[in-house]
Amino acid sequence: MPRSQRNDNFIDKTFTILADILLQILPTTKREREAFTYYRDGMSAQSEGEYAEASQNYYKAMRLEIDSYDRSYILYNIGLTHTSNGKHAKALEYYFQALERNSFLPQALNNMAVIRHHEGNRPFNKETRRFQKLGLIKLLSIGNKQQHLPPVITLKHRIGQKLQDVLFLLSE
């Protein structure tokens, strides 16, 4: 029995029933339904703190899901499981991949900022510097894809922030 059908929570059971009805009504392929089932089971396991099981379900969903937009949410949730396990560098990679597929994921940007802040408060060592340089390079490439702010504000903010990051890295 899939994990999502074992939930004791009334809201989770209701969501599961509604999702099953929608999957039957909407024209979807068997592959899409299976991918959604794994995704839903991953969310259920994640909400219960079972991050290893959640990751396994998300990886299975990734193998089946072909839609880039849907894959972005799966990647985001994989990043969440790594964040919860303290694997921040790995989580950042998944957040970056999610943003490459869907640049309108403010929750991924927020989590990346939280990780960067957390890493910035730790004592510096060679690994931390490498981590920061990797993050800066990736942020520079993703920053150019963000289109949801007015161009003048986006450009001014990006230039100011990137200049501060470059100056910080050069001052080391």
Image (tube, rainbow, N blue to C red):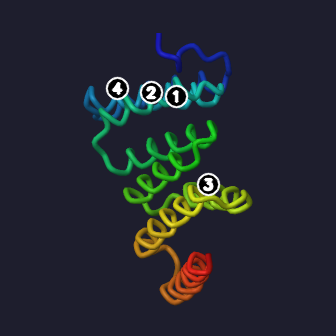
Q: Residue at x 56, y 37 (%)?
A: 81
Identify the element where label 1 is drawn: helix
Residue 165 in the image, given as x and y percentages of width and height: 58, 77
Q: CA distance from mark 1 to mark 2?
A: 5 Å
Q: Is 121 above or below relative to 6?
A: below
- Which amino acid, by three-letter code, is at mark 2? Asn
Please tell me how crowded label 2 is: few (under 14), some (14-19), or many (20+) other residues with Cα within 10 Å.
Answer: many
Give the amino acid at mark 1. Answer: Ala
Disc 4 or 3, which lies upstream in sequence? Answer: 4
Give the labeled residue for mark 1.
54
User: CA–CA distance between discs 3 and 1?
Assistant: 18 Å
Alpha carbon distance from label 4 to label 3: 28 Å
- Disc 1 vs disc 2: Cβ atoms closer than 8 Å? yes
Q: CA distance from mark 2 to mark 3?
A: 21 Å
In the image, which disc is placed on residue 111?
A: 3
Q: Which residue is mark 2?
A: 57
For this orientation, the residue located farthest to the top is 1
Q: Is residue 36 above or below residue 124?
A: above
Residue toward you, 159 or 71: 159
Q: Earlier in the sequence, mark 2 or mark 4?
A: 4
Q: Which mark, by number, is residue 118? A: none
Up-down: is 52 above or below 101?
A: above
Dot 3, how many residues are within 10 Å of its Cα: few (below 14), some (14-19), or many (20+)? some
Q: Residue flagged by tag 3: what amino acid is it?
A: Asn
Which secondary structure, mark 4?
A: helix
Return the disc, 3 or 1, that comes first in the chain's sequence: 1
**Residue named by callout 4:** 34
Query: What secondary structure is marked by label 3?
Result: helix
